[in-house]
Image (cartoon, rainbow, N blue to C red):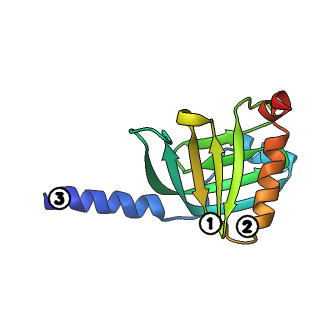
Amino acid sequence: MWFALLVLASVSVNACSGGPVRLTPELQQRFDTEGIVRRADKVFFRYSHDLGTPRSGWEEWPATLIVTHRTIFIHDGVRIRLEITPRSTGEYRVRREGGRVSVRAGSGRSGRSWAFHPPDDPERWVKDLRAVIEASAGARRRR
């Protein structure tokens, strides 16, 4: 029992420690080419899923958020949690509540959201996130 708790504590500390997410050289080059507008490293996100259903739930974890002129990219160091590009066909929305910003993907019961507290100027974050979403294929299709 004690051993299991010690291993769990070690994994938790390691998951939250360290600096920014290391990107592959290809991703770093892509984001540099697109022009990084905003970046927040190790921001805690509240990920909510199955919104409006009995199976709904949420979890929190630290991740890096990169916003370029063309992409929204959330990565937790292990996997890509969300990527919105000009080719994305889904339905996306951004909402601000005080200092908290949330990005929602999907609609109805298939909705998922990533909420976070940006390190600075929430209104500018919302504006920059919305600019990417409005340029996506899904937004263009719904106009």
Q: Secondary structure at mark 3?
A: helix
Determine which of the numbered discs, if any, sits on residue 117 in the image.
1
The residue beneath circle 2 is: 122
Q: Could you say which is closer to the camera, residue 62 or residue 20?
A: 62
Task: Work out whether 123 lies above or below 77.
Answer: below
In this rendering, the label closer to the viewer, 1 or 3: 1
* Residue 12 can be seen in this image: yes
Residue count near mark 3 (Cα–Cα under 10 Å), binned few <14, some 14–19, many ≥20: few
Q: Could you say which is closer to the camera, residue 78 or residue 70?
A: 70
Determine which of the numbered discs, if any, sits on residue 126 in the image.
none
Q: Secondary structure at mark 2?
A: helix
- Tell me if 29 is positioned left or right of 80 in this view: right
The quarter of the picture where residue 102 lies is bottom right
- Quarter the N terminus occupies: bottom left
Along the polypeptide, which appears first: circle 3 or circle 2? 3
Residue count near mark 2 (Cα–Cα under 10 Å), binned few <14, some 14–19, many ≥20: some
Farthest left residue? 1
Q: Are marks 1 and 2 in contact (CB under 8 Å)?
A: yes
The residue beneath circle 3 is: 3
What residue type is disc 3 on? Phe
- Tell me if 129 is positioned left or right of 111 in this view: right
- Tell me if 102 is positioned left or right of 124 in this view: left
* Residue 37 can be seen in this image: no
Q: Are marks 3 and 2 in contact (CB under 8 Å)?
A: no
Residue at 22% across, 60% down: 5
Query: How many marks are shown on the rendered structure?
Result: 3
Residue 48 in the image, given as x and y percentages of width and height: 50, 48
Q: Secondary structure at mark 1?
A: loop
